[in-house]
Image: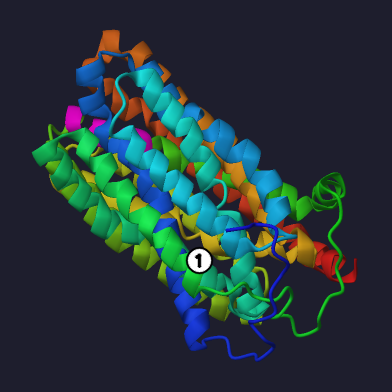
Amino acid sequence: MSISAPDSSLAGTERTDWSPHAVYTLGFLTLISSFNYLDRAILGLALPLIKAEMQVSDTVLGLVSGLSFVLFYSLLGVPIAWLADRRSRRNIIAIGFAFWSAMTLATGYVANIWQIAATRFLMGIGEACGVAPSNSMLSDIFRKARRPLVLALFGTAFSLSSLLFFPLLGWIGQAHGWRAMFIAAGAPGVVLAGVFFFTVREPARGASEERRQQSKAGPLPATLRFLAGSRAYLLLLVGVSFMGANVYADSAWGPTFLTLVHHLKLREVASTIGPIRGVFGGLGILLGGILTDRLGRRDERWRLRLPAIACLLAGPSEALYLLGQGTPAWTTGLALASFFTLVHQGPVYAAAMSVAKLRMRAVSVAVLLLCASLLGQGLGPLLVGALNDMLRPSLGDLGIRYSLLVSALCSIAGGLAFLTAIRYIERDMKRAAEA
């Protein structure tokens, strides 16, 4: 399975966006992305059981759940995306999917917290091969006008993972222990990676463009300098960094919050978080994608304005979830936060690729992921864990609800960054097209 194969032209030049193979490729990439989310999120579900077995502090758990994964995931994501802008993205995704699934499987057999940290490090290498090459593939299959909707559909991977897989793993963990969850999550991915390799074609570069660009692959420093010259892109980096802290902090500590504050058991946590986030998150992503697609035809600024508004609304929704006393209050907050939080993902990735040249698209997404991961996933869970330890002497188990308010503030800051990017997006799109 070589990753050095040249770009295939099998995709052809026919501009039927929703051809059977295009839909199949979108569906399979979405399924792979759902395993990407699942394999990193189940550690948060297992944290209470791991803490009870291994007797470690919340600061250490925050370090393992965030920074140990993110170091390889974020730092290797950019060079892997640079390779994906030059070689077969299909092969890179298949290899990465098989490897991170194998590392998830291996987590079920660890003996201590440091071995968990090691498998998380290695899982990050594999998962770095997923999102950026997938976005690049989809940009060559679907035209620019369809990309916000297509990437929103791709973003439903989070909902698919939360709605279907998360409750199932919660049941497995409750019945058979936390190790069985990792084994059950990792084994299918190894098989599906092979199916993906043999059934999905590599699309031709620029096949979706109305006017084919003659863009050659340049060195990575030149690509980074070009992206750094876009003010809109730099503001997108700021926004996704704040939203990464929001999403990853809540993903890592949400199950512990429900266990400590609302006294839910593992299976109850999974059956509560999974369906609510799955249903309302999916609705938010789909409705946001549809509205962005329609409003953006009239005014390009809506392609960022709507995601920005959603992020601003996610902040108070998150606060209601964390501070709500009764079950109706906090479940309403969780539903609203789930609805608004991921609306930005598809449109922001589409915007990032629109200000990049043809052979810079995977890198443009990878640098977004670098910031979202290194600053968001690396610092978000760690900061909440450290605040938990600081607040526990005075507030006990209730301290976590105030530690997690960091995520609500980050959502508001992300929305403000996206709003500011609107001022520069049109100019920077022209710059990319003319370069």
Closer-to-camera residue (101/397) = 101
Q: Relative to 194, does residue 221 appear above or below in the rendering?
A: above
Q: Is residue 54 visible?
A: yes
The residue located at (30%, 14%) in the rendering is: 56
Q: Is residue 336 left or right of residue 288?
A: left
* Image mark count: 1
Residue 332: image location, x then y, percent: 24, 52
Closer-to-camera residue (376/304) = 376
The residue located at (52%, 73%) in the rendering is: 200
Question: Disc 1 designates what residue?
Answer: 197
Q: Is residue 375 visible?
A: no
Type of the residue with mark 1: Phe
Q: Which image quarter: residue 428?
A: bottom right
Q: Relative to 44, does residue 225 appear above or below in the rendering?
A: below
Residue 36: image location, x then y, percent: 43, 51
**SS for dot 1:** helix
Residues in magenta? 251-260
Task: Give the quarter of the figure containing the N terminus.
Answer: bottom right
**Residue farthest along the top direction in this orientation:** 393
Residue 100: image location, x then y, percent: 45, 45
Does the magenta portion include 255? Answer: yes
Task: Give the quarter of the figure containing the C terminus.
Answer: bottom right
Does the magenta portion include 96? Answer: no
Magenta span: helix, strand or loop, mainly?
helix
Closer-to-camera residue (281/86) = 86
